[in-house]
């Protein structure tokens, strides 16, 4: 079991490093090309939507058939809705904290509020992403399907790593644009992904030692990823779509196709 924990830790350290790589783009430019950023965000959204089904919901249903007395569709639906509700509540908490900060100031600093909200929201939704990777590696305890589960876990880690790149840039570049130094912008950008290794190990521990929670954990992670993709990434990448109406949309289609191809080929 220690090997599974170690693999989950290494995988989530890898996804964190991709966040840091995205944050490092602040070193090269102050203002990103909007079209490129929209394409990257769209690609990340497509990856997350595809991973939510093939890498999380599908194995959740399979696991529920094996370990749960409830109908698998109910288990997957309950976990999915709980994950989405968790992210919705988290967003409300962050929004409430921002409003309190505004009320505490005679002259609210709108720029600082936006930056705090940005860093907190991305950090917050990195927690279930780390859990998703950890839970996927927790499936490796089933020796009969070891290679299939390993490929599935790697695919999830790769998919989340891909969408972490624009997230790192999405934190560091706005910070730089608002006057922070390149070093501080980079440090804050990569810090948003530091929660992934911790949550990854926790997810793996839950999957290994609490077998009945595994299908719920997988579908929970799917719910969080779908909500983030639909509520945050897709609307963000569709900004200024009048200039290039289908540019970001093609990023979504491409991300979905790449993730689907990887999962089907490797899983």
Image (cartoon, helix red, strand yellow):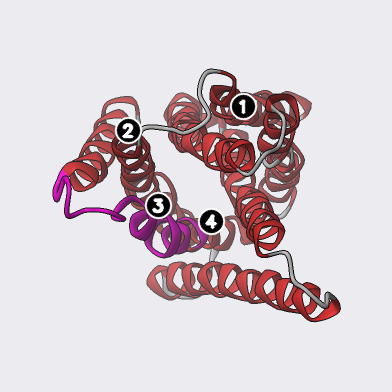
Q: Mark 4 points at which residue?
A: 221
How crowded pointer 4 is (Cα within 10 Å; few <14, some 14-19, many 20+) is rated as many
- Residue in the image at 62% along x and 36% along y: 176
Q: Mark 3 points at which residue?
A: 52
Q: Mark 1 points at which residue?
A: 11
- Residue in the image at 33% along x and 50% along y: 237
Q: Considering the numbered disc 2 on the image, is that residue within a helix, a strand or a loop?
A: helix
For residue 192, which quarter of the picture? top right
- Distance Cα–Cα, label 2 vs label 1: 27 Å
**Rendering coords of residue 189 (x, y %):** 66, 36
Vertical arrangement, residue 130 with respect to residue 110, above or below: above
Please state, as top left, top right, bottom left or bottom right, where the C terminus lies in the image.
top left
- Distance Cα–Cα, label 1 vs label 3: 18 Å
Residue 36 numbered tag:
2
- Residue in the image at 72% along x and 51% along y: 206
| Mark 4 vs 3, N-terminal side | 3
**Rendering coords of residue 154 (x, y %):** 49, 28
Vertical arrangement, residue 222 with respect to residue 175, above or below: below
> In the rendered picture of this protein, how many numbered marks are placed on residues?
4
């Amino acid at each position: 079991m220690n090997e599974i924990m170690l693999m989950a830790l290494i995988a989530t350290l890898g996804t964190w490093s991709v966040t840091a790589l995205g944050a490092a783009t602040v070193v090269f430019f102050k203002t990103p090309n909007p079209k490129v950023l929209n394409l990257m965000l769209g690609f990340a959204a497509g990856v997350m939507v595809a991973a939510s089904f093939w890498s999380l919901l599908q194995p959740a249903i399979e696991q529920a058939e094996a370990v749960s007395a409830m109908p698998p569709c109910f288990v997957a639906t309950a976990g999915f809705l709980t994950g989405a509700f968790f992210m919705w509540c988290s967003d409300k908490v962050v929004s409430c904290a921002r409003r309190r900060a505004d009320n505490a100031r005679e002259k609210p600093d709108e720029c600082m509020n936006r930056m705090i909200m940005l860093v907190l929201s991305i950090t917050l939704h990195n927690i279930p992403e780390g859990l998703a990777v950890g839970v996927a590696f927790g499936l490796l305890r089933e020796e009969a399907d070891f290679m299939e589960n390993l490929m599935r876990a790697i695919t999830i880690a790769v998919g989340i790593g891909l969408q972490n790149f624009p997230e790192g840039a999405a934190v560091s570049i706005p910070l730089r644009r608002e006057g922070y130094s390149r070093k501080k912008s980079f440090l804050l950008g990569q810090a948003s992904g530091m929660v992934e290794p911790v949550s990854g190990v926790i997810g793996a521990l839950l999957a290994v030692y609490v077998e009945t929670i595994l299908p719920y954990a997988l579908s929970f992670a799917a719910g969080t990823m779908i909500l983030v993709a639909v509520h945050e990434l897709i609307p963000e990448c569709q900004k200024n779509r009048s200039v290039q109406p289908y540019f970001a949309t093609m990023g979504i289609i491409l991300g979905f196709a790449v993730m689907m191809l990887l999962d089907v080929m490797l899983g």
